[in-house]
Amino acid sequence: MPTPPPPDAAHALTLGPDAFLAGCRADVERARAAAAALRAAPAAGPRPTQPTLAAFDAVFSPLAEAGARAGLARSVHPDAAVRQAAEQAEQEVAALATELSLDRPLYEVLAGLDPAGADEVSRFFLEKALRDFRRAGVDRDDATRATIQALQEELVRIGQAFSRNIKDDRRTLRLRPEALDGLPEDWRRTHPPGDDGLVEVSTDPADYVPFMTYARSEEARAALWTLSRQRAYPVNIEVLAALLSKRAELARLLGWPSWAAFATADKMIGSAEAAAGFIEKIAALSGARMEAEYAQLLERKRRDTPGAGRVEPWDSAFLQERIKAEQHGFEAQSVRPWFEYRRVIDGVLAVTGALFGLTWRRVEGAPTWHTSVETWDVLDAGHVLGRIHLDMHPRPGKYQHFAQFPLANGQLGVRRPEGVLVCNFPEPRPGAPALLEHGEVKTLFHEFGHLLHHLLGGRTRYAAHAGVATEWDFVEAPSQLLEEWTWDAGVLGRFARHVETGAPIPAELVARMRAADEYGKGLMVRQQMFYAAVSLELHRREPGGLDPGALTDQLMARYTPFRPVPGTHFHLAFGHLDGYSAIYYTYMWSLVIAKDLLTPFREAGLMDAATARRYRAAILEPGGSRPAAALVEAFLGRPTRFDAYRAWLEQG
């Protein structure tokens, strides 16, 4: 097996727009040439199955590499010209990918292979490839295939516009300093008044989340909440209408009644009806808890506002925080001094290294797209397994939330994986260390779970199976599982040290934090079901005559206890409608699996290396080379069950 070269995919993001686009186009041409070679008839006899599959894999691998670089650059590059070039590259990559997915001679090469005698991984690869060809419409007539290709290319452009309009619409309020009453002192120090005496607060998560949690001024919270839900309005009205219409048109061409039906058919859940049933099941299970928690919110609000008739959505996080402080003796601000940003980064590296037998080594002077980006090599048994880049702080033009992006997909003997964490945590400043909420620590571990999956699943035989390549409704399970480590006092004690004294976080404080976290679970689950229902129903309904805003309001009233607010447009800034389209339900579906995957760790201990290595081998390393259900059964020794999730939902 040849030794792959050192990881250096980030170098492409240091180039100017023309060179960046040229590099992506070179990969597109490599893919085109590999496809031409594969179509050529063999000299004699039937094609050998596994070498032919390897050649087929080599057709799509360069497209995946170019697409990964372009997707990252579009989301994080500080130069608008490079972001624009990356959008163009994504369109060209998607165009060829669609063209190849509709290439009948290429399909016939695979359809003519004999799976008998091939190993299990190769048979699964062949089965999925043939299924995906058929789902793409390869068996339609020439005119229909041409229409499908045009629709697919148009959908890429529309989706890019939808996401760009959200990313670029950063809104701000200017408030009097007293409107910041209740916010942590370290947060206030980073938001000094301007020359006009006012403080600027933005809709960026680093501002928005603490403000909605701690600001005592209901008027200010309402203003920021409303402003956040006006992003991408009105520009995304027509963009979303086109996105829904074109997806529905494509689904019908492919023989499906709706985009939701098409999007769910190749997932673990199997159908749009099953997805809708799952949403209703979870909503029913959490309904009584949500109502009881809402009643507590209203009771608490009436202490401040006698005679209040309802709780508004901008009240929820603030009132939940007050209830946790008063009834459970815990305030989220109280743990911030133990979660200094640098220590938390070092902590996630140390914890995952101990669990999975990895060593993290900082790479100084590595090429990156911004001076704030850190680069680390990950070593496994002393050998470089891959590389990660940490792009952790907000800046103009950057993706505004938290995600793991692939930069290079690993393949055994060919390429080492490279992955990127894209986050928006507060940035440390001289004399002002950045302190995180526990929720932000949990978010970091969550996204790091995706990164580990990408890295440890990056030594598969076929590039198509590398990393996070499982069914989409399993993708979140490994990352949701890793969140559990942030609730354990022993784990937190390894890195959560007081910013001033260096003392480890007290176990009793962690216990109070865990007890307080039980409150609000019903509200959170029903809010997630609202998001899932919006995602599914916008794609399950006939788009002609559909009013997405009215439907979103109806679903908000159905699944949450809060009233829709006139003048807000949540659906226009719901970024998951681009990437996830109809399948936001996958977050809760994956959580059901994650709670079950936790059971062996609960029995052996969260830091039990043997269990972690077994999990690594069964779940993470195979990537997408087996069905997700088979991965789960290999680790648990049985199919997944609902029991652990139900117990979690009912706990407390």
Image (cartoon, grey):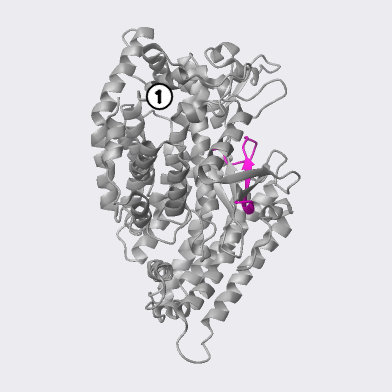
Q: Which residues are magenta?
A: 381-402
Q: Residue at x 61, y 18 (%)?
A: 186
- The quadrant of the image that shows the N terminus is bottom right
What residue does disc 1 label? 514
Q: Is residue 601 visible?
A: yes
Q: Residue at x 52, y 47 (%)?
A: 452
Q: Quadrant of residue 303?
A: top left
> Foreground residue, 251 or 127?
127
Q: Residue at x 35, y 19 (%)?
A: 311
Label count reads 1
Q: Is residue 387 magenta?
A: yes
> Foreground residue, 136 or 266?
266
Up-down relation of residue 152 to residue 272 (above or below): below
> Foreground residue, 177 or 359?
359
* Residue 548, percent from left and from top: 37, 43
- The quadrant of the image that shows the C terminus is top left
Q: Is residue 439 visible?
A: no
Q: Amino acid type of disc 1? A: Arg
* Residue 273, percent from left and from top: 26, 51
* Residue 566, percent from left and from top: 39, 29
Q: Is residue 445 magenta?
A: no
> Residue pushed farthest right?
365
Up-down relation of residue 429 to residue 137 (above or below): above
Horizontal side of 25 relative to 293 (left or right) equals right
Please tell me how crowded label 1 is: few (under 14), some (14-19), or many (20+) other residues with Cα within 10 Å: some
Q: Quadrant of residue 37?
A: bottom right
Up-down relation of residue 458 to residue 117 (above or below): above
Horizontal side of 323 relative to 575 (left or right) equals left
Up-down relation of residue 203 to residue 280 (above or below): above
Label 1 secondary element? helix
* Residue 381, percent from left and from top: 60, 51
